[in-house]
Amino acid sequence: MSKDDLSQLRLEQVDNLIILCDEAMRATPENVKRFIEPAPGVLAQSKAKQHSLIFGRRGSGKSSLLRKVVADLTIDRRPISFVDMETFKGHSYPDVLISVLIKSLQEFHTWLETAALTPATKTTFWNRFFGRAPERKPFKKQGTQEVIKELEQIISDLENKLLQPEEVDIQSKQISTGSYEVSGSAGVKNSPIELGGAFKKGGGATLEKSEGYKSIKTEYLHQNILKFQRFFNKLSILSEGPAYLILDDLYHIRRSDQAKVIDYFHRIAKGNGLWLKIGTIKHRSEWYVHTDPPTGVKLGDDAKEINIDISLEKFSTLKTFMQKILANLMNETPPITVNGLLNTTAIDRLIIASGGVTRDFIGIFTKAINHARERGPEHHRGPRIGAEDVNLATGEYGDIKREEFKLDADDDRIALEDAFTKLVSFCINDAKCNIFLVDIKMTGPEREAINQLIDLRLVHLVQSRVTLKKGADGLVFEAYMLDTSQYTASRKVRDLDLIDLNSKTFSEDIRKKRLLYAG
């Protein structure tokens, strides 16, 4: 090891590296230059002329991928709109759909005023976000201005409709009881409430009710769908190619509204030169509801599934990917190097602690730097970040994960917390192991809870097919690892059988009946 390697933790460039890491954890247009493809072909699939649902755990790189799609397609002068759905968290239908429509069209408006018309010679504009200038010529100014003017009118109409209160019509209502008969009508129209009715003493024993509900905003959306279709058809003609609408983090809006929002945009897009790219957490989302007629999009038929998660089962692939991310960041802070700052066991421990989630990997890494610096280079653990530094950082980072869990779990939080508490108890008190097995055919609430805990980064897949040594002939199981933040640096860790994912005997070590979790 060189003298430089021995002193890297003490270099001021490490401070710059920590700042870069903090920046890299946020998916912004400026960070596109740091994008690293998680698997070959993922970027090309995400830019293809097809509707796509991009799945991945929180922090897995969905937004970074979609930002890269924006940059590449903009360089090709393809109209594009990027909408962060977290903005509309808590909005109710149909206002959530109108709001997303407005934001989508506003982003197209901005794109048309800038990227569509800016000459390639204005390198300052192009290099700032996109890295290079486009080869295609700018759009024709007159045609673009006509489309912009039409777009402004559409946006204005939508904004006016959004501000209006819902209008409700209740047709009639009549109730007959043993002693009274009540009849009347009510209407709420643009706020003033009108009530009318009559009370009549009677002697019947019947109950009669007639009621109707009409949502004026929903009717407006239905009536104007042809207008939106015509607009995107014009935009496609103007650009001589398709446009793209990216809805990022769909899971932030109410689950009951997700399929309805997707369905509306899918109807607008079909055959009109518009492709949808939707990023979300798989088991926190509802993209298709089997109603009459069906609502949303069906994977395989209407949209392609793109899953960007790399599980711990593919450890070597994951390690190569994570090392590229670190090396890419350190290229901006020479002379810092991966081997100069971390030892091999630390890198492996970082990958396992992160569960294969990029943002968690970077977050734990920066905390590990601080722990290693605090103990000093002369410590017996050595001058580089070691496994114990990562362990301490992982326990600390667990608080962040639990806070994000509370935010993302939303209405299901209590049920998922109960399911997770039960799972942790099983691993620590019953199995006494960091690995647990689940029957591959498990269904119902228990299976759904595990799926959601995976997406919420508290449980990680480590092997997709496991058979027991004895006692379960013909049955196949999946092996999962409890997130290391739940037991690292804990007193109970001494009582746990911590199975090493990189052990040569790993596949045999997990074939134990005591690891079987029944829910």
Image (tube, rainbow, N blue to C red):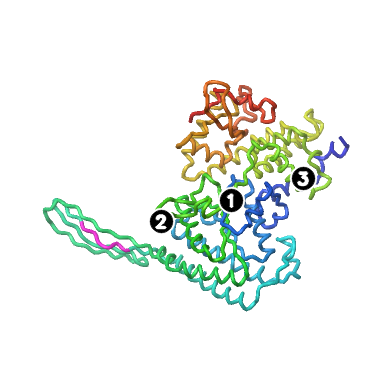
Q: Secondary structure at mark 2?
A: loop
Residue identified by numbered label 1: 54
Amino acid type at mark 1: Ile
Q: Calculate the distance from the C-alpha at mark 3 to the C-alpha at mark 1.
A: 26 Å
Q: Which residues are magenta?
A: 169-174
CA neighbours of label 2 inside 10 A, class few (<14), some (14 to 19), many (20+)? few
Q: Give the answer, above or below, for where 277 lies relative to 143.
A: above
Which residue is found at the position 47% from the left and 39% from the top?
414
Q: Calculate the distance from the C-alpha at mark 2 to the C-alpha at mark 3.
A: 51 Å
Q: Give the answer, above or below, for where 516 lies relative to 172.
A: above
Residue identified by numbered label 2: 293
Q: Position of residue 437 (x, y in %)?
A: 55, 29
Q: Earlier in the sequence, mark 2 or mark 3?
A: 2
Amino acid type at mark 3: Ala
Amino acid type at mark 2: Pro
Q: Quadrant of the N terminus?
A: top right
Furthest-left residue in view? 203
Q: Nearer the viewer, mark 2 or mark 3?
A: 2
CA neighbours of label 3 inside 10 A, class few (<14), some (14 to 19), many (20+)? some
Q: Position of residue 50 (x, y in %)?
A: 58, 57
Q: Quadrant of residue 161?
A: bottom left
Q: Earlier in the sequence, mark 3 or mark 1?
A: 1
State yes or no: residue 409 in magenta: no
